[in-house]
């Protein structure tokens, strides 16, 4: 794909691209069109050295879709639309430290998440991304056909609910709230037809997928584990090194992400806005 008003450089062969030559505060209409194309083409796009106030971050997010406020994350002071992704020097655990995709526990999962680095550690704190198109395309044809006919149950109670991982974590109280707002489990196709690209993507993730629909958790586990291992192959991933003012905008229907927790004793503060998506259709629908 060619771009005329921005430069788009792939990060790895597997996933993600950096968008250069743009100031998100003063985008032309043609640049905006091309940024949208780059997002659909690469699944996650990165920008450097952006000087966005919280208001400008919100304005940029609203260009994509209405904001889908995460009900569990504590907000940045004064900005209910912005979720704080914070780790203090004395904290040991981080947010997002395992492969996942945001909001798959919702009936209409968020389309994307726009993460802006406010304060980064000297070293470490990278975020990894994995390409769920490649994950699906590289499975054997027989398994692809089987998965295309399946659906999976997703939920958030074990992570965000009362007695869940975050409620039990003593560091969780400063980060999460609304443990009673988990809602009912939801069912999505295991292989979706991506709403923007029309491509087939694998749509299960280790954090929020509970089991295949009509299967027990025990029966589901071996196949889910196989898919998780396959989808995280290094060939499908990229790793982003943050600087203050860097932005990652990822598509939750086309990628997974993983926040590396390798910067003990330092602060990392990010602002995240999730933008609304839609109900997901099966690839075969
Ligand atoms: C997240 O999982 O949304 C946070 C990712 C990060 O902090 O790098």
Image (cartoon, rainbow, N blue to C red):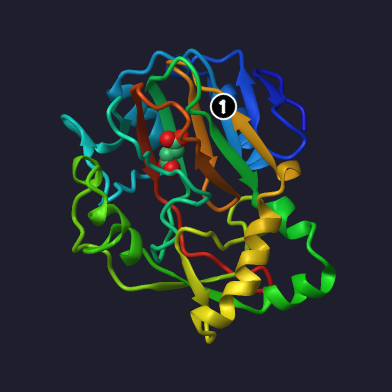
Q: Is residue 106 above or below residue 112?
A: below
Q: Residue at x 40, y 66 (%)?
A: 107
Residue at 55% x, 53% y is: 253
Mark 1, residues whose alpha carbon is within 10 Å: few (<14), some, or many (≥20)?
many
Point out the quarter of the image occupied by ligand 1: top left
Q: Which residue is mark 1?
A: 46
Left or right, 74 with reference to 17: left
* Quarter containing the C terminus: bottom right
Residue reaching furthest to the bottom:
214
User: Relative to residue 163, is residue 40 depicted above or below?
Assistant: above
Which residue appears at 53% of the width and 19% of the height? Answer: 28
The answer to which quarter of the image holds residue 128 is top right
Report whether 255 appears left or right of 14: left
Tell me: 143 left or right of 183.
right
Q: Is residue 119 visible?
A: yes
Percent of width and height locating residue 45: 58, 32
Please identify the residue farthest to the right as the structure is shown: 141
Q: Identify the secondary structure beneath mark 1.
A: strand
Residue 255 locus on image (x, y percent): 59, 48
Q: Residue at x 73, y 78 (%)?
A: 146
Q: Position of residue 6 (x, y in %)?
A: 65, 19
In percent of width and height, residue 283 lies at 67, 68
Query: Is the distance from the Cβ of mark 1 to the nearest ligand 1 atom less than 8 Å?
Result: no
Of residues 233 and 204, the one drawn nearer to the viewer in this rendering: 233
Left or right of 259, for residue 35: right
The N terminus: image quadrant:
top right
């Amino acid at each position: 794909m060619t771009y005329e008003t921005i430069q788009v450089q792939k990060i790895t062969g597997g996933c993600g691209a950096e968008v250069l030559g743009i100031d998100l505060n003063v985008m032309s209409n043609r640049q905006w069109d091309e940024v949208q194309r780059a997002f659909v083409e690469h699944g996650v796009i990165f920008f450097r050295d952006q000087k966005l106030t919280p208001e400008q971050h919100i304005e940029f997010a609203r260009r994509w879709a209405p904001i889908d406020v995460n009900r569990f994350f504590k907000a940045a002071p004064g900005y209910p639309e912005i979720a704080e992704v914070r780790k203090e020097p004395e904290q040991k655990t981080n947010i997002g430290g395992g492969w996942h995709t945001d909001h798959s526990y919702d009936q209409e999962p968020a389309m994307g998440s726009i993460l802006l680095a406010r304060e980064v550690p000297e070293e470490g704190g990278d975020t990894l991304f994995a390409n769920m198109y490649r994950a699906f395309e590289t499975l054997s044809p027989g398994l692809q056909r089987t998965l295309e006919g399946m659906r999976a149950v997703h939920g958030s109670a074990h992570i965000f609910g009362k007695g869940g991982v975050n409620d039990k974590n003593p560091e969780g109280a400063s980060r999460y709230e609304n443990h009673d707002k988990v809602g009912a489990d939801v069912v999505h196709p295991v292989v979706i037809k991506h709403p923007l690209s029309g491509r087939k993507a694998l749509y299960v993730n280790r954090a929020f997928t509970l089991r295949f629909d009509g299967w027990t958790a025990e029966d589901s586990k071996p196949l889910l584990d196989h898919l998780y291992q396959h989808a995280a192959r290094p060939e499908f991933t990229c790793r982003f090194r943050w600087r203050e003012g860097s932005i990652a905008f990822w598509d939750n229907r086309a990628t997974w992400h993983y926040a590396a927790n390798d910067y003990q004793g330092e602060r990392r503060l990010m602002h995240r806005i999730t933008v609304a998506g839609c109900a997901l259709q099966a690839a075969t629908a």
